[in-house]
Image (cartoon, rainbow, N blue to C red):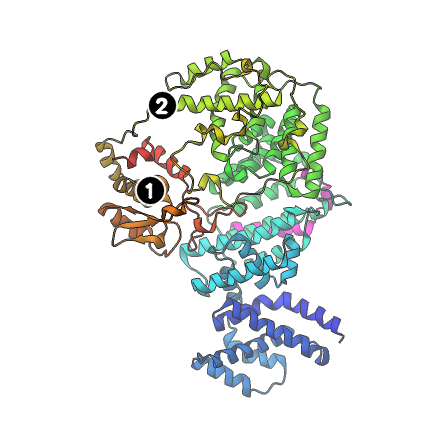
Amino acid sequence: MTSQDTHRAVDAVWKMESARIIAGLVRMVGDVGLAEELAQDALLSALQQWPESGVPDNPGAWLMAVAKRRAVDHLRRGERLDRRHEQLAHEIATRRDTSEADLDEALDDLDDEVGDDVLRLMFVSCHPALPAESRVALTLRLLGGLRTEEIARAFLVSEPTVAQRVVRAKRTLAALRIPFEIPVGPDRAARLSSVLEVIYLVFNEGYAATAGDGWMRQDLCHEALRLGRLLAGLAPGEAEVHGLVALMELQASRSAARTTPSGQPIALHEQNRGRWDQLLIHRGFAALLRARQCGGPLGPYVLQAAIAVCHARARTAQETDWTQIATLYESLAKVLPTPVVQLNRAVALAMAYGPEAGLALADTLVAEPALKDYHRLPSVRGDLLSRLGRHEEARREFERAAALTLNGPERTILLERAAACAEAAPPGTVPTLAEAASAFLSRDDLDAATVRSYGQTMSRLRRALGDGIPLPDVSAERVADVFTAAWGGAAPATWNRHRAAVRSFSAWAATQGLLTGDPARDPAGDPAHDPTRAPTPAPTRDPAHDLTRDLTRDPAHDLTRDPACDPTRDPTRDPARDLAAGLGRRPEPRGRTRPIDRPHIEALWQRPDLALRERTLWLLLHESAAGVGSALALNVEDLDLAGMRGRVAARAGRESSGSRWVRWRAGTAELLPHLVAGRGRGPLFLSDRRPGPGRPPAPGDLCPETGRRRLSYERAEYLFKQATGYTLDQLRTR
């Protein structure tokens, strides 16, 4: 054999057999990193010997035998061989080497459950303690047999980045001493969901590439399908595994019809369904049938596969049963209540019941922090607005989507749709209040908390004045009438918060020239409308969850946070067009927050419906009188349970102040051991769900044992208000 032939043969064998070899070695040595090194040694031996001896009849058994010999040698050197290892080593050393088949038979006692070994390796490489990108890299390396450069090329990152992710993942697994076993009970279900998530992440990256010049990466789709089919064979009784395989088979069936010869994307309703792969469709149907035969409640992957079946059964786009799809999305939203699912549901509603129904749901997602930089939200809104004839609004949405996406072909399509909307819009169109409000809230310089606060104000104005009213017809007098009716009897803080929103909107509209119907400057000069600008990078910390900021301050009151309120931004602004001119600021009392009455406090602790996390947090705040931010910033490793206190590190930018202590009393001391049971480090108070892969939290805000993030101030405040009607500040005041 030539050297090139040998390399091709070794590469093919490695991709097929590497998972089985590494899994068997991990069971022997108990270390993922060491197992991969031993397997690589066997691979090197093949490269050295096969050019002369030829490829063995059973190359996988040959590699397994060599790798296990190296493992036995390692165990001997470490003086950690038990009697079973000694017996096996003696048998391997003395047995007559007649053929690879005989040698493989000699190892049967250590290979009795190879399938289980591969399944164990899946659970280890996809452990929730690892970040999502590390899980993907390690899974493709160990189970997919891909080299570092292949993974880097697939995800458009550098080779050192992939190598670091793999190394860190191995170190994390070694430090946490993750057992090489298949979890049982509830832990298995949680870990299985992580495995499925990783496989689907790999498939999605291949099906619709996040970045780059290609719309699809078929190699990743094929690899995810291979891993999914392998997992289905190893766990035949898991409905969600078969559901995921069905979903991937059905989606992959459309691959040939999804792009033009030049590589441009083709929308689902425009695809030539005659090019859909019928074999993959039948395999998807069969996998979904196996999922249903497993029984149990319908999980998210089974429901998504059922949606894909609705598309696959329709011979034309017009025959698609969108009513059934909308019903399935409603069920999916109950078991997987994420903003992305709701966005997909909005599309289904629009197709089933008209664009108005879809836009109504999509508009509620504008203030979602998780979708702030997600390009498909403005893309969907642009499509629905265009179908409603609101072309100018649609143009802005398509341009915003184009600015956010990192995929070249998708950006081209979005800009083409924006240009088409610009041509369809009548010249000199005067924006309506609804159009201006949507553009105002879609600005990149507003954080999520401010968007939510401003959105409440603008929604009330739109309901009172009408979405279709031309913006120049909105006067300060009419705004004042709405304020008097809506918030005339409200507390000064509430009045001032809504007043700040109107002032910001008015200042922004004036700089755009929208209040007079004659734009003061070309919208193309606004960075928010520049389709060539680079997308705003995702923050390393989600502002809505940043516990280092001053949590006692309402962002809606801080006008310096919003550039539109900067008086130096437009010195020529006409005060007569200030929509907040009739709204005077009301003085707010500076006294302490009024505490909750003692009877209400005592009744709170007697409620049986309170979760352990809420009871512990609320009792800690009440007993310690600490700030909410300080309580939420506590970490498990910084607790002194015996001393009934916890150390809070200095906030960013205030290192000179050093750390401080939060102290509690007996009630909290009784609950805390139950809350931290099984956890040695990470945030004390955790959110209900693990974060999505698109918005990973800062390392210090992620629990390594559970994979969940630190409970945010906004979520904690919401839960307390829902349960009591009070604020957390009132709870802690004594």
Residue 215 drawn at (x, y percent): 69, 46
Q: Residue 54 is drawn in which quadrant?
A: bottom right
Q: Amino acid at mark 2?
A: Glu
Viewport quadrant of the C terminus:
top left
Classed neighbour count for the residue bearing mark 2: other residues with Cα under 10 Å, few (<14), some (14–19), many (≥20) = few
- From the image, tell me which residue sits under label 1: 614
Viewport quadrant of the N terminus:
bottom right
Residue name at image x 43 percent, y 82 percent: 83
Residue name at image x 45 percent, y 29 percent: 556
Measure how far apart labels 1 and 2 are at the Cα level: 30 Å
Residue 676 drawn at (x, y percent): 33, 52
- From the image, tell me which residue sits under label 2: 588
Give the magenta part as a residue range.
Answer: 267-292
- The one nearer the camera, 320 or 418, is 418
For the residue labelled by badge 1, is the local secondary structure a helix, a strand or a loop?
helix
| In the image, residue 392 above or below residue 242 | above
Classed neighbour count for the residue bearing mark 1: other residues with Cα under 10 Å, few (<14), some (14–19), many (≥20) = some
What label does residue 505 carry, if any?
none
